[in-house]
Amino acid sequence: MTKILIVNASKRKKGNSYALEQRFKEGMEGKADVTVFRLGEKDVRVCLACDGCKRRNVPNCVQKDDFTALIPEIDTCDAMLILAPVHWDQFPAQLKAFLDRTYSFMDFTQPDFSMAGRKDKKLAGYFFAGFGPVDVYTQMVETNLKSFATAGFRDYKAHVAGGVNVPGSIMEKPDDLKAADEVMEWLLA
């Protein structure tokens, strides 16, 4: 069965990320082994840039927090889905810390700079923008998703839903829900 990690990077428990998290979990039920990691409820510290993770040949980190405990799940999943709001034209701060911590997968001695156990994984980013230029936000999301390649995520898709600042309003946007269903099908394929 396909193993999918959902990373919910929102702190709004009744927000759009949580609404779609539920939709994805229900849509994948019986089709995938789904693990949900809610960043807003976890201790994910910033990368110390100490290079302690470079002292072994497997992804690891000297910090003992919830991200470190998740490293094996990140390394062995088939796909990861990130659900997050856009904050000030960027990833939310805790998601940026999560991304920075994937430095623990980097191996400068490898041609692809990766010590990930699997390098064929899919990554989808589904982001929510209340206001602002969706095309610019989509470019930002795509640029940041490419950075996850070090952790073995080489194939990615991005979608930014615009005009969804009100919690739960994504459920009233048929085109964006269709895009969510297409992302789900792609992750499961």
Image (cartoon, rainbow, N blue to C red):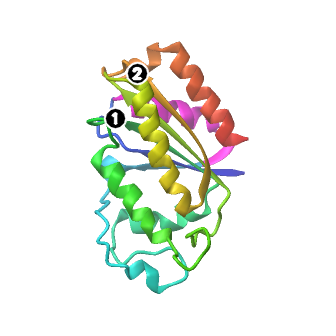
What residue did someone put label 2 on?
162
Q: Nearer the viewer, residue 170 or 109?
A: 109
Q: Name the side, left or right, on which 117 lies relative to 60.
A: right
Do we see residue 51 in this rendering? yes
- The answer to the question of whether label 1 and label 2 lie on touching residues, with beta carbons closer than 8 A, is no
The image shows residue 120 at horizontal and vertical percentages of 68, 57
Instruction: Specify the amino acid type for callout 2.
Output: Gly
Q: Residue at x 63, y 38 (%)?
A: 28
Q: Residues within 10 Å of mark 2 (few under 14, many from 20)?
A: many
Reply above or below: 31 against 61.
Answer: above
| Residue that carries the numbered disc 1 in the rendered image | 86
Q: Look at the image and give the residue range highlighted in magenta.
A: 15-33
> In the image as oriented, which residue stretches furthest toward the bottom?
55
Name the quadrant containing residue 179. top right
Residue 25 figure quarter = top right
Image height of 125 relative to 99, above or below = above
Q: Secondary structure at mark 2?
A: strand
